Amino acid sequence: MAGGRRSGRAAAKRAAAALESTPKGFADVEDEPMPDAETNVPAEEQQAPPDPDDDEDGDHQPKEESGDDEDEDAVEKEDEESVKEPTPPPQPVIRRKRLGRPPKNRPPDWDNMVTVPERDADTPRRRGRGGWRGRGGRKGGPSAPKAEQIIDADGTVAEIVDDECVLPEDPEGETKVDKMGNLNGGREYRCRTFKVTGRGNRLYMLSTEPARCVGFRDSYLFFTKHRKLYKIIVDDDEKRDMIERDIIPHSYKGRSIGIVTARSVFREFGARIIVGGKRIFDDYGVAQARADGVVEGRLADPDDHFIEGEPYNKNQYVAWHGASAVYHTNVPSVPVPNGKVESKKRKVNVNDVNWMLEHAREASTFNASINAIRKLNNAGVYDIHTNVMQYPLTMQPTRARIEQVAPEDEGTTQGTVTFPPVPPKMTRNFYVADTYFEAPSAGVVSAAETQAESADFLASFSGLGAVSDDIKDLLPPECRKAFDQTLDKETAYRSQWGLESETMSRRQPIIDKAIVPYSMT
């Protein structure tokens, strides 16, 4: 049994040596399972301690003892060789937080801490894909690409220098503006200009102001249509300085602010960005303008209202000064069917002091609106259902007559400017019709009077002819004379129209009896 104990001790030494030669972290060490002590085992089954006299008895296993001695010698020899090898000291480890974002669905055994060697604890973390120096790469690597921009549909690339595209210069245009954007010759920009901190003495504009000045609604189309302009987005420090100088309001602190150099805007638009600008005289590209046949001295923007000698209103293109109000009017984008424009009613608190004034004012406003609607109706109202222009009844003819003029009777129309004489070959081969519009004299017959229908029982009571003689006799002599004259005019006017069968060619149809026989009775 002594040999068995020595063999177990040698195995323990080998295990300890192997553990020391391979350092492990705390996470790799596993606890050995330990069986629970059996408390209910009978005393007879418990193993008795070994008898010391058994060690002296060597007759029962003489061969095993010799074999164990040989194994023990070999093990001890191996242990001596392993002890001679240098054992590295165990390396200290630390635990720190994992890098990166934790998973959305964490497993039950997720540990937010990770075990790393102590030598890696002070190593600086890398920033993204760019390595130690961020996106710019390591020191000594390739430099950042030059700022470039495509300036036309053909893909022409222009370099960006001093916040603007490098373009060919016009010798005559260079005399009107310097490199910083200052105008020469007494010229003045229609928009506000300012300097930006950290960018020298160069003049800049808010991109929205020249965009509105030349007719764009926002700066997006302004830079999309004019690719030779370079848009600059200011940083927080520049934005804070612009707010302190009242260039932009404080509410724009969280917005993206775009600016553009004043020189590049003048090179692109020329006289259109100058107060009272005239073509060629205030243009930058003079040679190109003359090649295009531009009239020299013509106003670039006739709609720009300004008074010479008075300061120009540059705030009309500033958004927070009302420049964007033109895009928020209540006027409909398409004309309404009846031509009326809806307007909001003015709210007034009516009391016992101003009620009469407000009543008269509202009545006047209502009358003015009625007159405006009538004037619009005179030009015709488009009916969307029938696709027809409808006109008021007072503007439409209510009676008509047709008179055929023989060629020999056309002498009466010779010499008139409205209806010159018609050549004989035209009257012989074509149907020629002249249309006359005739209105009754004022006070004779109402222009709105229509022709009476045959079933109209009140037709005999319309007009001055319906007045009985008993009532006429009651009139004074002067009034009776005026009444009779007006009655004669009315009778003459109505008699010239006649019946439709006589004056409107509505005669009986002419039917060939050989084709359609019918009885005349």
Image (cartoon, helix red, strand yellow):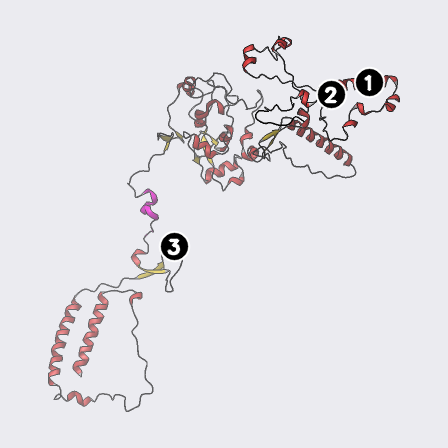
Marks 1 and 3, how far apart in space?
108 Å
Q: Residues within 10 Å of mark 2 (few under 14, many from 20)?
A: few
Comparing marks 1 and 3, which lies closer to the viewer?
1
Q: Amino acid at mark 2?
A: Arg
Residue nearest the viewer, comparing 410 with 98? 410
Marks 2 and 3, how far apart in space?
99 Å
Give the mark, 2 or 1, whose residue is nearer the N terminus: 1
What residue do we see at 68% from left, 23% from top?
Answer: 500
The segment highlighted magenta reads 121-136
> Can residue 429 be seen from the camera position used here?
yes
**Vertical placement of residue 115 versus 379, above or below:** below
Residue at the extreme bottom: 44
Q: Amino acid at mark 1?
A: Asp
Residue nearest the viewer, comparing 407 with 78? 407
What residue do we see at 18% from left, 75% from top?
Answer: 10
**Vertical placement of residue 175 versus 226, above or below:** above
Say which element carries label 2: helix
Location of the C terminus by quadrant is top right
Give the mark, 1 or 3, whose residue is nearer the N terminus: 3
Is residue 289 toward the left or the right of residue 437 in the image? left
Q: Position of residue 89 (x, y in %)?
A: 24, 63
Please give the residue where the numbered disc 1 appears in the rendered image: 484
Please give the residue where the numbered disc 2 appears in the rendered image: 494
Q: Position of residue 457 (x, y in %)?
A: 76, 31
Please give the residue where the numbered disc 3 appears in the rendered image: 101
Please check the rendered image and state whether residue 402 is part of the magenta-colored stretch, yes or no. Answer: no
Q: Residues within 10 Å of mark 3 (few under 14, many from 20)?
A: few
